[in-house]
Image (tube, rainbow, N blue to C red):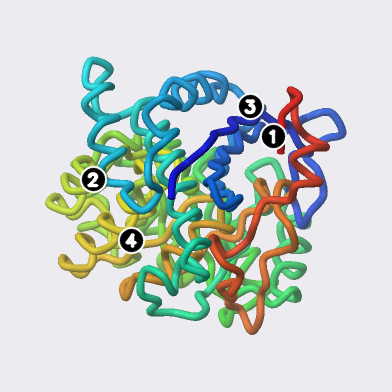
Amino acid sequence: MKIESMVVLPMAAPYLCDMGEPYSTTEKIGGLAVLLRADEGVVGENLLIAGSGKGLSIIAEMVRSLEPLIVGEDPRKPGAFLAKARAELKHLGPTGVSLMGLGAIEGALLDLRAKIAGLPIHRLLGAVHERLPAYYSAALWPHVGLDGLQKAARNIADKGYWGMKLRAGAGKLDEQVARVKAIREAVGYDVKLLIDINQRLDERRATRLGRAIEPYDIHWFEEPVDGRDHEAEARIAAALDTPVAAGESAFGLDEFKTMIDLRSADTLMPDLQRVGGPMEFLRVGELAGASRIKVSGHTLPEMSLSLLACLRNADCLEAMPWSAPFYEGELTISKGDAIVGERHGWSQGLSVKAMREYALVKADI
Ligand SMILES: [Mg+2]
């Protein structure tokens, strides 16, 4: 068995937000599909996304440059491809665009292997979970007023999600606390509330805000400071009773190992695009588990769910609809949990119709 061809397809789709409503009629989200076709007609797939599509063309070129190394290879020997590709890319360094390019191909290779085996990815790799708690992530933005926050929070709770995420950190401390309080008044304490600072604060302000909102039972306090400052993250994690989540901006196993050694977070959240592919995602998860640290994902729930389902220390899934327009079907939520799909390959599969509709170039798919 061998890989016959690779398609790298840039796309642009509606940028979904706030329970499926687009941010605006004009703004688009960029997608990049990587499709590997094997000689028996099986196609392995992977997706990358980027708001407005900036940067995806560079990753696309990186992936295309690796085509001579992957075409003709046996998809059941992904390690051989990765070793060869890492050696070729040594002059560019082991992280950044090189790592994203490798990960994009490795994700498609894993999907291909699962399809060849006739199994969902979580069953191929050793499923621990059939379902994972899911929190809704595309609402409760900093620009929304208190009434709007309460309305959106009730809407998310009514839809049956396990939790919801508030973006915070912009503005005065008492205003931020008032926003958390307003959500708790609207939905009570049966639903989880997660707070994402998106790296907006310095260490002192983050620690003060983290302490001030502790009475409101926060599931986690995410990316409180600059996502590269893992020592400051560790000091904040030590200062707060509320768990800290971080790592969506980290690249590769080495950076996560630094975070684990420092105890920068109680939950690590590797991003499938930056961590360097699905196997690196799982290695981060296992390494974190050995230090009693939990793991979650970042965006791309259609694929992250398959991997988190294999980790004993999985915390929860980010239900983020940005990638949804590119996929068949919807994320299935039942009693607060996302249900892992039983189709062969990733939990959800890319939609051929959507790829054709949103493609920015003509491609053979
Ligand atoms: Mg975040």
Label 3, label 2: how far apart the Cα atoms are: 26 Å
168 lies left or right of 280: right
Position in image of residue 32 (x %, y %): 60, 34
Q: Observer-nearest residue: 158 or 311?
A: 311
Task: Indicate which disc, 3 or 2, sits on the residue closer to the N terminus.
Answer: 3
Residue under pointer 4: 267
Q: In this picture, is 101 found above or below 273? A: above
Q: How many marks?
A: 4
Tag 2: amino acid: Leu
Q: Quadrant of residue 122?
A: bottom left
| Disc 1: which residue | 29
Q: Is mark 1 within 8 Å of ligand 1?
A: no
Tag 1's secondary structure?
strand
The residue depicted at 79 percent of the width and 37 percent of the height is: 356
Q: Is residue 107 toward the left or the right of residue 158 in the image?
A: left
Q: Work out whether mark 4 precedes mark 2 in sequence or the reverse, and give the earlier one.
A: 2
Report the Cα–Cα distance between label 4 and label 1: 27 Å
